[in-house]
Amino acid sequence: MAFAAVFTACKDPMAEITNADYPRAFSPVGLKVTPATFDVATVTWNVIDGATSYELELSQGDSLLFNNIIATYETESLSQIVTGLIGETQYSIRIKANSFRDGQEDSNWYGVAFKSPAEQIFNAVASADIKTSQMTVHWTPNAVVTKLTVTPDIGDIILTPEDIAAGMKTITGLTPVTQYTISIYNGTQRRGMVTATTKWRPSGDGVVELSLDDDLRTAIADPANVGKIIFLPEGYNYVWSGGTTAVGGFTIYGDPDGDLPIITCSAGTPLAVNGLTSGTDVIHFENVEFDCTNASGYFINQGTDAAGNACHIQSLSFENCVLSGFARSLVRTQALNESFDTIRVNNCVIENRGIESGQNYAVIQSTVAFDAFPNIIFSNTTVNVSHAGFLTISGGVGQPSGNNVLIQNCTFYKTVGSNSATSDNRFFIDAGNNGPVNITINNCIFGSVVGVGNERGYRMNAAGAFTSAGNYATTDWTTVEDLTQTPPMQNIPVSMYNGSCANLFVDPDNGNFHFKDVTFEGKSTAGDPRWW
């Protein structure tokens, strides 16, 4: 059987379009507007063959009507930066191609509508500025503004010249434990919005109110106070000398309407929880400043009870606290089978920790087999100078699986490395000898290591999962990586900021982590929100 082969020549359809004698150029397509900030956007489009340039018109306050043209542009490129936009405002932009061909008209207009993002001149509302019945908001000083609007219930507050110059206003007459939305305006144009919830002041039968002279250790050790809130008044300044053994769960709650009550740990390990073995006890600290510079090194250094039973705590948490001067660890376990179901640190400042020469204890330290930490959570917290490691949960192959670590929106400064050149340097997270552990680090800023050298990021059992997103590091955050080890030493995935801590922060050596570089792309998403 014979076959006949037939070949058909292929043609380039673009060549036909290019060479065709069309009376008008084709309109640009793929027109896209990408906002960079509330007042700047980038406009892009696809190339049109035969176009010498492109014209654009920007209209404000309409949707594709183009009856209020406020800017025109002409460019030979495929993008255009549009500036001078107003936040939360409707715009339309259209484009046409100018043809170089004789006798061919320019293209028709092609347009899209878009709305600019909201402007934000407010700072995040700091916890210290929130009370039970009032809060103070801050914005860019001397900004062109006229009023605040507060919902629910409060309404408009006209700003005085003094308010505007200072960039701050205290709003009074608020209801406790209520979420408020505060907007700032120039006339009818909103320039920023924040939300914040007023604080709670405990009262009732479940509250033990201490006077300025009452002894906190006695209150903690009293079985009648198990499960209760021990309320510390404004001005409470207590010297915690020696250890106290808890007989059950409790809450220490400082007056939210004043300066933080101060607890100075002068000797020994302040809190022992040896006898708490049921797994039902909850220990919580809120609105308290701890100064443990002169204590033995730990806040909790946990062993067994007199009968040899391991402790089992349901929850240990710190909220809006300053935790300063722990020479070694906030929590250390040192016996088999100990467990803290949840350790949570939120909206706190940890500073000057791990300063004991030659020691290498992490903020949370466990190197004992079978100890369990199902949930370790650090959020919205600043760690300012913390020698050695941050988390060491490497108790050996017998340590149970199911441990989870979540670190989000934290700012770290000088937070890993030894405090002496002769000491072993540590990991930011060492979970290398664990059973499987899941580690998540999101939206954090890593600024500088202690600086002795050979600082490390993390290691973990290969069966665990490590995830991260939205993290940044300055150029003086330097950790080493060695993937040949078992388990491998790995760096924490970050986006590198093109500068040191001194370039990014206002005054890091003195604990001021507000952003000096206002162009930093993570300024409203990364790190402890108190600095936004």
Image (cartoon, grey):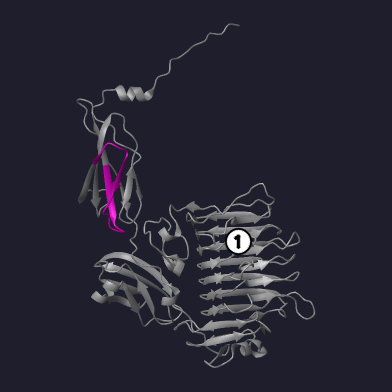
**Is 521 above or below relative to 282?**
above
Residue 213, given in percent of the width and then of the height, sits at 54, 93
Rendering coords of residue 63 (x, y %): 27, 51
Is 258 inside the magenta-drawn segment? Answer: no
Task: Label 1, secondary structure: give it.
Answer: loop
The picture quadrant where one finds residue 423 is bottom right
- State the image coordinates of residue 137 (x, y, percent, origin top left): 36, 73
User: Residue shown at 27%/36% (left/top)?
Assistant: 76
According to the picture, the residue beneath numbered tag 1 turns out to be 421
Quarter placement of the N terminus:
top right
- Classify residue 163 as left or right of residue 212: left
Residue 189 location, quadrant: bottom left
In the displayed structure, 458 sits above or below 241; it is above
Q: Nearer the viewer, residue 289 or 112?
A: 289
Number of other residues with Cα within 10 Å of mark 1, as a class: few under 14, some 14 to 19, many 20 or more: few
Instruction: Using residue 80 as the reference point, say whether residue 314 is left or right of it.
Output: right
Residue 83 covered by magenta stretch: yes
Could you say where residue 302 lies in the image, as x and y percent from the top left? 70, 75
- Give me the residue at 52% from left, 67% from top: 383
Could you tell me which residue is drawn at 45 percent across and 60 percent down? Answer: 501
Q: What's the amino acid at mark 1?
A: Ala
The residue closer to the viewer here, 105 or 532, is: 532
Q: State how many labels appear.
A: 1
The residue sitting at the top extreme is 2
Left or right placement of residue 334 versus residue 317 in this view: right
Q: Nearer the viewer, residue 342 or 11?
A: 342
Kindly identify the residue that appears in the image at 24 percent across and 53 percent down. Answer: 60
Which contiguous range is marked in magenta? Answer: 74-94
